[in-house]
Image (cartoon, rainbow, N blue to C red):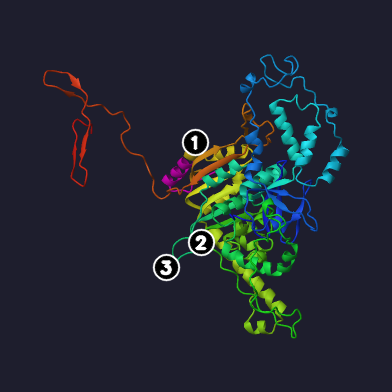
């Protein structure tokens, strides 16, 4: 995760109303926020996150608005100076001279029982407020002060009602925003409010459970040459119908979601060279250093001096196209393989992290370029029926030399694509994945039938569903009773020397011996309002399905040797000892263990222990 804003990156702006807005910071462009204002995107480049900014009005002679960092003491000024008293503390408050029968309660506590919210109590009309906005294009503090001063019933409000009224006006008229980084959790929160059906109602706590139970973690990217025979590790198989949200969460855990600073430095330098003149024109001189304005400072973009002269646009002689280089080497460890049913996987949410699967030529420096692999269901189940898996006809070198550059380039492009697809499909069909993560609208039984055998022993299986009914059927299929019946059928057929006859349509649609310890669980974190005297769950929380999770562990059943449990299962008898005087029974003495410290001998003495 980056600590500052980079060019062409996505950031989140939290508005005073609480709305989260995703904005792409493109150099030399203008960012527009409805009902707040506009400012240059260059003012955010190189700035840290989690700061609150305020849009300033136009200065004399300037064409663009500026930004000001709001200090912490100003943000918390109302909290520090106006401490809201709890109802228990306000009973002894005698500051109000209003009669008890109208505004104060029976015990002296002020309430709003007789308060009437009448628009006529506000002396300012909407036309006058609009004129105030035009006359005072600043941060909005003056407008809020005049609105509150012109309210005739402000003195009748309780401390709680006054705080709510002030907060409501501040959210409406303050021209501020807080810049936040766009990570997976923030994207989940935004999509739950905007379009929850795209992510299958997947909440942040459920996404965390999926990552934990699937044991997604970082693995080595490169394989050491001396240990080339070792099997690759850190490979996960994913069926994702959440537009790439689950893939993004896994990539974040595996260290593949964000570009390295070294890989992205060259792109920033090239972009800075192109936009150097335009950025210099938009930077204004600093009129007041004490106002903490940040529009006067240039964005933190590295612009090294070019070493060579730029080549002319028109060449005297047309240059011949070179053949395309071979396909890049795909990673063997720390990879994500996505199974999808369409010609192209739907991973649209990865665009917020500078990765576009539709156009891989623009993101070759991204870690997902070589660590994210896609396979269709047709390629997994019947690769011979897929046209992309078929090898294109080979052409000799002599024929290639006589071809035009365009046809020769198309030939190399098809060969590279075929080699890449065949390698990915063959690796997927061989299996050996460390885990399986499923978040799909498809029937889980059909997915598990073909994907569970691809997971190696000890791997984790995680299936998410918005409703519990599809996962309840999985729990029944992998239950203890059904597993015992399956084992008895197999053992009886093996004793007779015949092949077991198993009804795969009704009784055993899946092999119940492949998974161990199946569990079905759910979790939901409820938001609470924590205020003095007003702590309670938020009543405006959004509903929707709870979301359920099926988890299990992949095991390899032992089919060659019959394993039987042996031993004594009866209740052990206690041995008693009799003393010399006659017949009194004493309990057996416990085993004594004397162990010397410092590497001395260990002496064991046991008396009266049952064998």
Q: Secondary structure at mark 3?
A: loop
Q: Position of residue 453 (x, y in %)?
A: 52, 52
Identify the residue under disc 1.
481
Measuring 77% from the left and 38% from the top, which residue is drawn there? 144
Q: Is residue 347 visible?
A: no
Residue 221 is tagged as 2
The majority secondary structure of the magenta stretch comes to helix
Magenta-drawn stretch contains 490: yes
Compute the Cα span from label 1 to label 2: 42 Å
Q: Position of residue 268 (x, y in %)?
A: 64, 65
Q: Quadrant of the C terminus?
A: top left
Residue 226 is tagged as 3
Measuring 66% from the left and 66% from the top, which residue is drawn there? 361
**Mark nearer the N terminus (1 vs 2):** 2
**Mark nearer the N terminus (3 vs 1):** 3
Measuring 73% from the left and 34% from the top, which residue is drawn there? 166
Q: Quadrant of the N terminus?
A: bottom right
Q: Quadrant of residue 385?
A: bottom right
Q: Residues within 10 Å of mark 1 (few under 14, many from 20)?
A: few
């Amino acid at each position: 995760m980056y600590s500052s804003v980079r060019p062409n990156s996505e950031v989140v702006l939290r508005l005073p109303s609480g709305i989260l807005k995703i904005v792409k910071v493109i150099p030399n462009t203008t960012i527009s926020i409805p009902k707040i204002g506009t400012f240059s995107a260059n003012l955010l480049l190189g700035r840290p996150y989690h700061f609150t900014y305020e849009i300033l009005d136009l200065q004399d002679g300037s064409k663009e608005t500026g930004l000001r960092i709001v200090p912490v003491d100003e943000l918390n000024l109302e909290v520090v100076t106006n401490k809201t008293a709890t109802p228990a503390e306000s009973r002894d408050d005698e500051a109000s001279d209003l009669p008890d029968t109208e505004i104060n309660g029976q015990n002296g506590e002020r309430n709003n029982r007789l308060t009437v919210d009448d628009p006529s109590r506000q002396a300012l009309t909407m036309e006058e407020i609009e004129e105030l906005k035009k006359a005072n294009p600043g941060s909005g503090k003056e407008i809020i002060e005049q609105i509150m001063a012109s309210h005739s019933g402000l003195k009748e409000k309780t401390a709680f009602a006054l705080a709510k009224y002030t907060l409501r006006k501040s959210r409406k008229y303050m021209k501020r925003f807080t810049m936040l980084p766009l990570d997976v959790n923030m994207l989940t929160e935004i999509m739950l409010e905007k379009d929850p059906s795209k992510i299958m109602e997947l909440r942040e706590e459920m996404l965390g459970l999926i990552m934990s139970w699937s044991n997604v973690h970082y693995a080595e990217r490169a394989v050491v040459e001396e240990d080339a025979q070792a099997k690759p590790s850190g490979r996960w198989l994913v069926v994702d119908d959440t537009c790439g949200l689950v893939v993004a969460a896994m990539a974040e855990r595996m260290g593949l979601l964000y570009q390295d600073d070294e890989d992205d430095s060259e792109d920033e330098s090239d972009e800075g060279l192109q936009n150097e003149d335009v950025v210099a024109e938009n930077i204004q001189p600093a009129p007041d250093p004490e106002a903490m304005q940040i529009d006067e400072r240039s964005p933190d973009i590295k612009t090294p001096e070019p070493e060579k002269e730029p080549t002319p646009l028109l060449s005297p002689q047309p240059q011949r196209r070179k053949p395309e280089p071979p396909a890049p080497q795909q990673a063997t460890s720390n990879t994500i393989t996505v199974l999808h049913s369409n010609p192209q996987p739907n991973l649209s949410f990865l665009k917020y992290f500078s990765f576009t699967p539709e156009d891989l030529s623009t993101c070759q420096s991204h870690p997902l370029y070589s660590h994210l692999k896609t396979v269709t269901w047709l390629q997994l189940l019947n690769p011979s029926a897929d046209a992309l898996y078929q090898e294109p006809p080979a052409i000799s070198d002599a024929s290639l030399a006589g071809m035009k550059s365009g046809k020769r380039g198309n030939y190399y492009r098809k060969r590279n694509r075929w080699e890449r697809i065949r390698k990915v499909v063959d690796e997927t069909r061989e299996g050996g994945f460390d885990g399986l993560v499923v978040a799909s609208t498809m029937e889980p039984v059909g997915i598990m039938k073909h994907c569970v055998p691809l997971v190696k022993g000890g791997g984790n299986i995680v299936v998410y569903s918005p409703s519990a009914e599809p996962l309840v059927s999985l729990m029944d299929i992998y239950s203890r009773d059904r597993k015992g019946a399956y084992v008895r059928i197999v053992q009886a057929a093996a004793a007779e020397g015949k092949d077991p006859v198993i009804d795969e349509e009704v009784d055993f649609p899946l092999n119940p011996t492949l998974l161990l310890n199946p569990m079905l669980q759910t979790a939901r974190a409820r938001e609470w309002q924590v205020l003095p005297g007003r702590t309670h769950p938020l009543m405006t929380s959004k509903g929707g399905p709870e979301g359920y999770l099926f988890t299990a562990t992949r095991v390899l059943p032992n089919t060659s040797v019959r394993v039987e449990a042996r031993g004594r299962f009866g209740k052990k008898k206690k041995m008693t000892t009799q003393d010399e005087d006659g017949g009194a029974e004493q309990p057996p003495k416990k085993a004594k263990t004397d162990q010397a410290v410092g590497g001395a001998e260990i002496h064991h003495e046991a008396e009266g222990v049952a064998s």
